Amino acid sequence: MPPVLFLLMLSGAMFTLGQAMTREEKQQLRNQVVEMFDHAYQNYMDHAYPADELMPLTCRGRVRGLEPSRGDVDDALGKFSLTLIDTLDTLVLLNKTTEFEAAVRRVLSDVRLDNDVVVSVFETNIRVLGGLLGGHSMAVMLKEGGQSMQWYQDELLHMAKDMGLRLLPAFNTSSGLPYPRVNLKYGVRGPETRTGTETETCTACAGTMILEFAALSRFTGDPVFEAHARRAMDFLWEKRQRNSNLVGTTINIHNGEWVRRDSGVGAGIDSYYEYLLKAYVLLGDDLFLQRFNIHYASIMKYISQPPLLLDVHIHKPLLPARTWMDSLLAFFPGLQVLKGDIRPAIETHEMLYQVTKKHNFLPEAFTTDFRVHWAQHPLRPEFAESTYFLYKATGDSYYLEAGRTILDNLNRFARVPCGFAAMKDVRTGSHEDRMDSFFLAEMFKYLFLLFAEPEDLPFDVEDYVFTTEAHLLPLSLSAAASHSSSVSSNGTSEEELDDSNFDWTCPNTRLMFPDPAFPRNLRDPIRSAVDKSCPRPPTNREPGIGRPPLRAQDFMANNPEHLELLRRMGVSLIHLKDGRVQLVQHATQAVSAVAAEDGVRFMQEMMELSSQQQKEQLPPRAIQIVSHPFFGRVVLTAGPAQFGTDLSKSSTGVRGFVTVAEPYSGCSEITNAEYVRGHIALLQRGQCMFAEKARHVQKAGAIGGIVIDDNEGSSSDTAPLFQMAGDGRNTEDITLPLLFVFHKEGNILLEALKVYREVEVLLSDKARDRAAIFKGVDVQEAEEDCVTEATTPTSFESTTQTSAVELDESVSPEVTPSPETSPAEDTSPPEEEAGPAEAEPDLAQPKEERDSDRTEDSEGDTDSSSQSVDELLADWREDLEAFQQMEKDEL
């Protein structure tokens, strides 16, 4: 039987109501949000401003052109103090009016918009133009309240119009869809622009302009901005697939042909749907609501498979386009709340919450059985956004506890001395040297609002609409005169409204949920599906046809009788184009409640059977630096050995100080045994077998070993990790753990040893909670004692960028070969040892489709103590190409 992918949707469960969170608890959490914001914002101002973003591991600013290129993700940076502008209205919401006034003065005096730099039209619109408009809205509100900003004369609005005029040249296309990039100084035409040659853009990139551009038009009285944004929205609507009423992910900006025909609610499309509904809310134009409702009906018909949201093909919407989901779709439950469709919002949010609890954060992508597909997490706010809106809709304190989980995980796993660092790999806890501006713009807004009481807010948020970057635009703009008519993009006729596309009643959660336990009723079965703990009904229950129910081990996909049994249990079968079979259960489609319970048991058995058939995943190991001044904040990713201590079976790991073995190769008897004894030995790869190195340092009394690649410049960013094989002999005599790191990660350890003399590390299967590592020790006090040393740039701290890749998972699950290994003889480069294994591509996308790319480290000075970040950051360009190729292969 082929391996089976499945989706599980149940209805009905036993429940008990949880206790409501007290006002004192909410106040404590609200204060914690403010403290966390202060930690992130102040570190940006102290270490990064006027740079666009903070690099929290190296405690400095990211300036475009001075750091190695990361590819498309750098298109958000325009040398315009991005994080400060993006944070303006957050300061006001958090009652920091003094800081807001100082920030506005800084923006007006320091920020220039006429830089000769190519930026993303989408990102600049939502972050910079939106940030300036949100800041203007707050300044006007404060000024009218007579509290502060009495000197303000619409300066931020003037800057916003300047930025809008700089973005307008991007709309100079025959379709009206904007170019994806524009030069802030020169536009899109001419060789000096270094852009204007692109032929395609994503749907979200072109369809996420209307809120900011319409607000700019109505604030200034200049209709040109709203007119261009409307024209782009009209064109996308006209190019929808007329049978499915879905849009693709990428479109040709000149001829309107769909380049990528997969359709979902995540990366590449997400905020197009969001802006259709919110444009109706902000502008009061029924046309936008009609279009949204038509799209939404198709989403719920084809893409929504509660609790999952799976991409389909726009021309064949019953054909799945992929078997994984990306984290950007986490905004959708919040949009469903705005729509008034609460039940599927609860179901999808619960699935996302359980995935979050399973991995600490939402991975950038995860499979339909909730395993990691792409392991990065750049501190995205979409899940917090939906959590807030669901709490507003239901008043269920369950969502306050979800917010508490978000706070705890950010503090435990992402907080570093200079801010909050994105997660390179949620499985190991390794970090990435980035803190995107949206973290301050969005995350802390939604978390503060989640725990705030009405009296804690300086204004009524019900008077504003949130943009996709959580900037606040006043609903009073709907009363402003609209100078743009709602005509189709060919300019010939006005679109007619159809009453069948509207529900003219307002959703009422009190009537929808007369039983306050009803949301819990929806959540419990989904929780069981994610954590694989579905209860088994009694075996004497039958699917209503007078015979024992079908067992998973007996199922055959080509047996008509078995297919009929599945149908009666509410289980449908889909044949995927790669030969696999996907099972989906909707309990409501079963012929009876008893048959539905049998379907639950069948799906649970199939889950277990499928898991047994697939090759066991072999995750990487973690090296956590726990000594001063790191205190567990820096985590490196390492490959395991097929011999020695299995760290995955150790609850504590192996902890000790590192020392360099002599000889460094470890291929003969260790001559500095007195220093190696009781320590973790650092060894260089090459000249002999891995097992031989392990035996020599074990004989010298070492408690562990770390083998550092001798191939200068190698990094787990660009090369796949592998297992170190034995030497063909019995290796049961090796009892210590041996881990492998590439040259870049190993150099971090060597530099730390050079700078701090004593470096203590923890070898484990994944990064450990710092509270557990330092039990009985006041870590915060220790960090405060060494804060100056920890944040002052040194030759080491410029290297604390960590990385991780997933071990080979590319082998077909229909066979169970031995794991990919490195040859026992430790002489060949890692590319040869890794064989056909492929590194998991880095995905750290912008809101529309952030690709985290890096550029190859240049040849650096041979003196490692003087190495700069430029010499140590890895080349992620190959990852981008691999990701783009994978995207094509997926279709």
Image: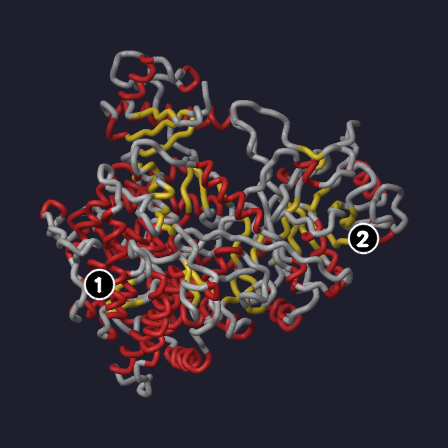
Can you say whether 782 is above or below 535 in the image? below
Q: Going 30% across and 53% down the picture, which residue do you hit?
A: 272
Residue 471, given in percent of the width and then of the height, sits at 33, 66
Residue 730, given in percent of the width and then of the height, sits at 78, 27
Residue tagged 2: 660
Question: Foreground mark, 1 or 2?
Answer: 1
Kind of element beneath mark 1: helix
Q: Is 818 left or right of 383, judged from the image as shown?
A: right
Residue nearest the viewer, comparing 726 with 649: 726
How many other residues sit within 10 Å of disc 2, few (<14), some (14-19) or many (≥20)?
many
Residue tagged 1: 282
Type of the residue with mark 1: Leu
The image quadrant that residue 449 belongs to is bottom left
Kind of element beneath mark 2: strand
The image quadrant that residue 316 belongs to is top left
Residue 706, given in percent of the width and then of the height, sits at 74, 47
Q: Going 76% across and 49% down the picture, which residue do you hit?
A: 680
